Amino acid sequence: MKKQKFTTSDFNSIGITELKWIKIFGKFAKSLLKQKKYKKDEILRIFKKIIENPESFYKNEHPFNDLANFIIEEKKAGKTGKAIYKSIDLFEKPIYYKIFGKHYIDKQALEQMDTAMRLPVTKAGALMPDAHVGYGLPIGGVLATQKNVVIPYAVGVDIACRMCMSIFDLPENHIEKEKNKLKNALILNTIFGIGEKTKNHFNNSLFDKPVWNATKAIKNLKDLAFSQLGTSGAGNHFVEWGILEITSNDKMINIPKGKYLSLLSHSGSRGFGAKIAKTYSDIAKQKTKLPGSAIHLAWLDINSEEGIEYWTAMNLAGEYASANHHEIHNKIYKYLGLKPLILLENHHNFAWKEKLADGTEVMVHRKGATPAGLNNIGIIPGSMTHNGFVVKGKANPESINSASHGAGRLLSRNQAFKNLTRKDLNKMVTEAGIELIGGDIDEAPVVYKNIDKVMAEQKSLVEILAVFTPRIVRMAEPEKRRFK
């Protein structure tokens, strides 16, 4: 039987956020578990009752009376303001939101989105067909809130995670003729893994901007960001060669129909974005008191000091993510002596100031969702063996001008490791004719939904302009996918 223990999130869920109080309640909870008289859930329920009404436990023959007495004394001394709070009430029912491809979306993701649509600051929302469970807002969720509100976890941990594609004036057969050279270009010019760094930069002019001194948090992370410029993370991040078949003579791309050698990358703002997300998510939880089911949806007022700081950092993370991709692509151009016909890019995991169809000014959070406003160009990848797509947005108001950012997961990473082997992965990529460098079984093609079915669910959201077929895929090596 799994040993029960309490985490910070457990205490946060019942309104205990200050470190001092977490330690006090934690010590008491540990003692109760040792006595084996109460289970974890029962202890948390009783703790919540004590917080709400400590007087009912005061001076009784009860193991909780000492804790209740302590809380009463602290209240008298005025010391419980930050530690214990009454949470903001959610709406009883979620505001209506459109779900695209509902039959492909798991129950937990739907429940998460329902919770987000019950926030008192929510104005509209939509769920994309690739949606699956995330922290707070499901991945594939689009949430429009009051214009002065930004939710760090509705943006996501990997702020401004981005797609970037270079298209070259080279034919389809170039990938076979120069396979070793293209493969070496990836091996020698990309760096993957959590915490990985580099000392060699192609262009680091982004770091000359004064905004790197705008806040203490940004300033403290500048060196980390600099050291990771031109690197990629773990998980589903990749750099890959493939064939792009342009199927529409569209002026937004302005390249004739045909098949072209292309380079596609997926990565974000690395450690810089992750640390900014954690810093301001923690602050938001302190500032906005929400019940347990919604705790990761705590928000900041963008006119407050903390809100201004987060907004500044988030937008810088967007610039950084773009520069990160350009760094990777430019190094590969230089190595191969190539120049692209065009560079296409877009990011997700971001918040934008926009207007709804009725003119209402809102803050649109797209967590794992591609901007699909009128004529917006976006890139929606499949998996390491399945097609990706270059699309043009149709500005559908039901999706809040959004589309999916990929196929979406069918299996969690833990489920993948339990049910698949490296042999299974090797067989999948071999049968698909893919050259895989690195990667692990939690990114096997079968852990993802069918990208063609996902795309079929969003014909009203985007127009497909081109189809990308991966051929040589580079991802993090298994041993570099977690911190040691």
Image: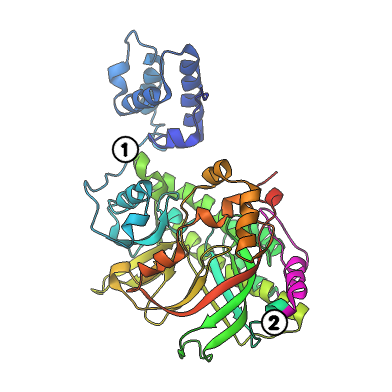
- Residue 179 magenta-drawn? yes
- Frontmost of labels 1 and 2 is 2
Q: Are marks 1 and 2 in contact (CB under 8 Å)?
A: no
Q: Residue at x 36, y 42 (%)?
A: 293
Q: Where does the magenta region start and end?
A: 177-203
Q: Residue furthest front?
A: 431
Above or below, 432 against 173 in this view is above
Q: Residue 282 versus residue 366: which sits nearer the camera?
A: 366
Quarter the C terminus occupies: top right
Tell me how the rendering is colored: rainbow
Q: Is residue 221 left or right of residue 40?
A: right
Q: Residue at x 43, y 67 (%)?
A: 452
Above or below, 221 against 183 in this view is above
**Badge 1 amino acid:** Lys
- Circle on res. 86: 1
Q: Residue at x 55, y 70 (%)?
A: 163
SS class, disc 1: loop
SS class, disc 2: helix
Coordinates of residue 92 in the picture (x, y in percent): 21, 46
Which residue in the protein does label 2 denote?
174
Label 1 – label 2 distance at C-alpha: 64 Å
Coordinates of residue 181 in the picture (x, y in percent): 77, 75
Coordinates of residue 159 in the picture (x, y in percent): 52, 61
Q: Residue 296 versus residue 441: which sits nearer the camera?
A: 441
- Residue 103 magenta-drawn? no
For the residue carrying disc 2, how many other residues have a C-alpha within 10 Å: few (<14), some (14-19), or many (20+)? few
Q: Is residue 4 left or right of residue 268?
A: left
Coordinates of residue 303 in the picture (x, y in percent): 40, 62
For the residue carrying disc 1, how many other residues have a C-alpha within 10 Å: few (<14), some (14-19), or many (20+)? few
